[in-house]
Amino acid sequence: MRRIETRLIRNQLNRSENREHAVPLYLTSSYTFENADQMADLFSGQQEGYVYSRYANPNVTEFGDKVADLEGVEASWVTASGMAAVFSTFGALLCQGDEVLACRSVFGSTHQLFERILPKWGIITNYVEFDKVDKWEESITDKTKLIYLETPTNPGVDIIDLESVGLLAKKHGLLLIVDNCFATPINQRPAKFGADLVIHSATKYFDGQGRVMGGVVVGSKVLMDEIQSFARHTGPAISPFNAWVLSKSLETLPIRMEKHNQNALLLAKKLEQHPKVQKVKYPFLPSHPQFEIAQKQMNGGGGILTFEVRGGLSKGKLFLNRLKMISLTANLGDSRSIATHPASTTHSKLTEEQRQVVGISSGLIRISVGLEHIDDIWEDIVQALA
Ligand SMILES: *Cc1c(COP(=O)(O)O)cnc(C)c1O
């Protein structure tokens, strides 16, 4: 078999009679049938093929197949956004009375699902701490159905030991679901450690250039069939155009991630030496509290790091205001470097005390390190710190 770098480029839809080199865009909502018998067979599932783009579309299939290949699993389901992938997964797999065991530090909207949406259907979530995996077992009840986590976490870039959690899930017969958005399958493949499903916001590194939204969940054929039947009838389908963009983007994912990893590690090392900076956190810095675990389960540290500007909230904001090149925006995983200040934005509704619990200090800055020349990224940061 060819290597993954090649497969991402060469595993694409077959050419049409026009012999196009790039894959065409299948902007069609439905597909025609040769005759009534074929129509009946396709509808009943006796024959495989395209029927309607809420169900499946060639561009969407191509993108989903590539992600399943990247994660080393059988099947995929692609959605309009990362949250649509998360919600479709819960909607398909959870029933009234079920419980979720989730790491406390999850993406904001996922947390809202746990707190406000799932409880409407009698599904409750018990939270556990990222650095106390040995205690997670105490929170498992006979109603627990699945374990849900992200690693590295957002925004703290904390690392959770996938091997330990994988063994725990197996021991108790629970599904393990990992949101692998920060690492990407280039840096980490959770299925190797026992994850049953892996979820991505394709909006981030898969696109990698801040253009389109998308989401995807991958796993075994059996589990994906359940998610597929939920999603087909509830309609979180991605547009063929977005799937086409994302599939093309995956062609460059390996080389982009290599550069994101390189730039972020270089920046993390430089920041550690700067007198106005403290507590630089990056999974592949030896000073990271879970450095050993990161080394064990990741091939690269990824593109996201955090640090604190000395002087707290006001100095943190001042730093952001002084940046000239690095963008202030809510996205991440872009070719352009992005800075955010969680305390005054995504986590501003929390009290100072609540923020401490999830590891967000007032001066914490998160950088999604882009693909610009590292010297230009560094120069912008140095002049803003001055
Ligand atoms: C962005 C993000 C999501 C949600 O994805 P959308 O595409 O914005 O819906 C989920 N998890 C993580 C870790 C994210 O960064």
Image: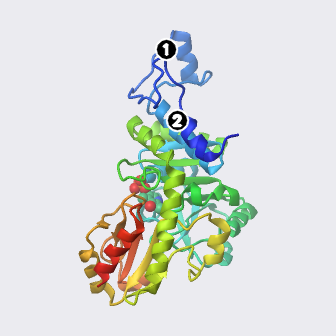
Circles 2 and 1, Cβ within 8 Å, touching? The answer is no
Please name the residue that numbered disc 2 is placed on.
61
Please name the residue that numbered disc 1 is placed on.
33
Foreground: disc 2 or disc 1: 2
Give the Cα separation between the discs numbered 2 and 1. Answer: 19 Å
Decide which of 372, 299 is in the foreground and name it.
372
Mark 1 lies on a secondary structure that is loop
Q: Which mark is residue 44?
A: none
* Badge 2 density bin: few <14, some 14–19, many ≥20, Cα 10 Å: many
- Picture quarter containing residue 116? bottom left
Q: Position of residue 79 (x, y in %)?
A: 46, 44
User: Is 121 drawn above or below residue 127 in the view shown?
Assistant: above
Q: Position of residue 301 (x, y in %)?
A: 55, 68
Q: Could you tell me the amino acid type at mark 2?
A: Thr
User: Is 18 drawn above or below residue 90 in the view shown?
Assistant: above
Q: Position of residue 337 (x, y in %)?
A: 37, 64
User: Is 70 drawn above or below residue 147 in the view shown?
Assistant: above
**Can you tell me which quadrant of the image ligand 1 is in?**
bottom left
Decide which of 201, 270 is in the foreground and name it.
270
* Residue at (51% x, 69% y) in the render: 153
Q: Farthest top residue?
A: 35
Asked which colour scheme the image uses, the reply is rainbow
User: Is 174 drawn above or below residue 128 in the view shown?
Assistant: above
* Residue at (52% x, 35% y) in the render: 61
Q: Can residue 358 be seen from the camera position used here?
A: no
* Badge 1 density bin: few <14, some 14–19, many ≥20, Cα 10 Å: few
- Picture quarter containing residue 2? top right
Mark 2 lies on a secondary structure that is helix
Image quarter (top left, top right, bottom left or bottom right) of the N terminus: top right
Specify which label sits upstream in the sequence, 2 or 1.
1
Q: Could you tell me the amino acid type at mark 1?
A: Phe
